[in-house]
Amino acid sequence: MRKLSILIGLLLLITIINVSAREYEEPTNISGFQDLFQWNDRVLENQSGIGYLLLVFMVSFILLKGFESAQAFTGCLYLTMITAFGCWALGILNSTYMISSIVLCALTALLIMWFSG
């Protein structure tokens, strides 16, 4: 738990250091969560979808590490793939990243099935 706290602290420190004074467009005409996510993506220069994928991958791997390594890795890749599809449907993730996550999840599942038999 201490290592996780140190890791989160370092990530917060990095983001605080990288923050610079920038002017952002005002959120106008936001009527729902999809508009809010798309505005957030524009403000973060189209990188919020990738951040969501990395966050889901890290959290799910930490939560699933009690299982066997292959199962935990496959499970967190599956959750990341579902998140990638959701981010793509919201319009905050490029289709290249979505297709890459599907291929990575399928390839990992096939390799585990191939070597376990």
Image: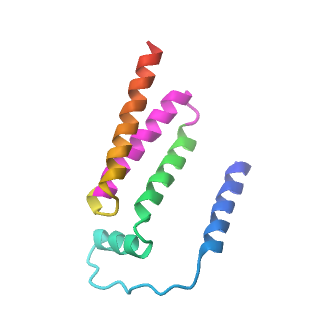
Residue at 41% across, 46% down: 80
The picture places residue 95, in percent across and down from the top left corner, at 30, 53
Residue 62 position within the rendered picture, expressed as x and y whole percent measured from the top left? 57, 43
Q: Is residue 98 above or below residue 113?
A: below
Q: Nearer the viewer, residue 86 or 110?
A: 110
Please tell me whether residue 84 belongs to the stretch shown in magenta. Answer: yes
Residue found 35% across the figure and 83% down from its top: 27
Q: In the picture, which quadrant includes the C terminus?
A: top left
Residue 8: where, in percent of width, then height? 64, 58
The image's colouring method is rainbow
Give the quadrant of residue 21: bottom right
> Foreground: 70 or 110?
110
- Residue 50 counted in the magenta span: no
66 left or right, relative to 89: right
Question: Residue at horizontal 26%, vertical 78%?
Answer: 31
Task: Give the magenta range.
Answer: 65-88
In the picture shown, does residue 51 fall above or below 99? Answer: below
Residue furthest to the front in view is 96
> Does 67 appear above or below 17?
above
- 36 shown above or below 117: below
Q: How far across and how far down the image is residue 113, in percent?
A: 41, 20
Q: Main secondary structure of the magenta part?
A: helix
Q: Would you say 102 lies left or right of 44 here? A: left
* Residue occupying the point 45% across, 33% down: 74
Numbered disc total: 0
Q: Horizontal placement of 54 versus 97: left or right?
A: right
